[in-house]
Amino acid sequence: MYPLSMDTPSPFSPPFPLQNTSSKFQSLNLQHYLEQPEAQQHQLQPQQAAVEQVNDESLHGSSIKNPESGVGSTHVFVNHSATAYHVTFNQDYGCFAIGTDRGFGVYNCVPFGESFCRNFENIGGIGIIEMLFRSNILAFVGHGDHPQYPRNKVMIWDDQQSRCIHELCFRSEVRCIRLRKDCLVVVLEHKIFVYNFSNLELLFQIETTTNPKGLCEVSQTTDQLVLVCPGLRKGQVWVKHNASKSTKSIVAHDSVLACFALTREGNLLATASTKGTLIRIFNTLEGTLLQEVRRGLDRAEIYSLSFSPTAQWLAVSSDKGTVHVFSIKVNLGNRSTDKSNCSSNSRVSVAASSSFSFIRGALPKYFSSEWSVAQCRLPGVSQYIVTFGNENNTLIILGWDGSFFRCKFDPASGKEMTQLEYHNFLEPEEPCN
């Protein structure tokens, strides 16, 4: 089936009191913690806290005991490797957070460096973690044989206070969390809840098809929320534009959705199915198919999709141990590329298309497919996620095994990427004196 788009009645229910959602600290207002000076949110340096600290003691290996939550906080992990349960970038992709079998940590991307790590005194695991840009607020869910918190609870952590300041409890396991400065999104297997982040009042909820991966994405750089989630049918995506109160239904694939990504403004959507061979790019406002690119011919599990900040490139990682970069040929008014980039991109357009395009229609479709302009082969069998670096034509790749790669690609040549940097953020550090 070819991708379809249609206007549908809104699947988003209005807010009403929920029997399966409870709040422990009803009187607490989060607005104070969100109002961080803009300059402070963009000055993260290696070995410097990504959040405001109560005092310097919390950055130098001392334990901060909290009678309410029973947790401790240290600057380094104990002297043996941790196991990563979750790895994720923050909203501006300048740093990343990890949830491990003993706590969580935050790291700077460029230059690479640990910002802080927090270990729980009872070695409790964190399976889902989400940062709020570079503020002192994080949200997470427990995981592992000894979860720090139940898997059906979302805990909101204020690192300035070194404690959880709020919790939301649900009837089933939480699959994903998404944060914006104005809202908190909690994804369950069949339902999504969207809360006002200033007071944690429920705004609306969404019923979805079975969603074990917790697929959900939200825009970040616009004032108005754009939210993307699975629909009620296989391969269907719903796009909610909160400003216009409209919802687009896009039948993106015949197979079950495996992964999708939004541009930061929320105007473009990339989707992949469980087949993992094709990635499709849609206009979220109209729901129209704009471009289709091919990762390969064999089935693959797509781990992550990521647009570059100007939506000039799309990066894809999969279980084949590869990362591909595709050229996006959509004309967006907000691109700020120079003439050399435009010239290079025009050469890419020719190189990325199959040389068999002159007999398009006479051969199977994959001969006329758009292929990647750069590739990178990664070691081992780890799951990797990918995003674009702050320098032109660079990628940052994170692995569940602790791998941190920074690579550079040349879209004109189509050659393998060049590795610029490697670290392992799970390797044990020397204990503090």
Image: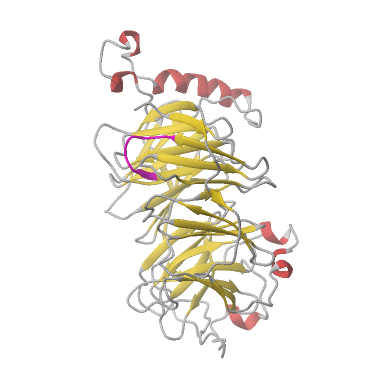
The structure residue drawn at horizontal position 45% and vertical position 81%, both measured from the top left corner, is: 431
Determine the residue located farthest toward the bottom in the rendered image: 67
At which x and y percent is residue 100? 41, 70
Residue at (46%, 35%) from the top-left corner? 250
Q: Nearer the viewer, residue 65 or 108?
A: 65
Q: Residue 346 magenta-drawn?
A: no
Asked whether 236 or 384 is in front, the reply is: 236
| One can see residue 340 in this view | yes
Nearest the eye: 296 or 11: 11
Residue range highlighted in magenta: 251-258
Indicate left or right for 200 with 171 as reference: right
Q: Where does the N terminus fall, quadrant-wise?
A: top left
Query: What is the x, y in percent for residue 167?
Result: 55, 74
45 in relation to 278, above or below: below
365 or 171: nearer the viewer: 171
> Compared with residue 278, is residue 134 higher up or lower down, i.e. above or below?
below
Q: Is residue 224 placed above or below 348 in the rendered structure?
A: below
Q: Residue at x 68, y 67 (%)?
A: 199
Residue 382 in the image, given as x and y percentages of width and height: 31, 55
Residue drawn at (63%, 27%), measured in percent from left and top?
338
Residue 110 figure quarter: bottom right
Q: Is most of the magenta stretch helix, strand or loop?
A: loop
* Residue 352 place in picture, x, y as percent: 40, 23
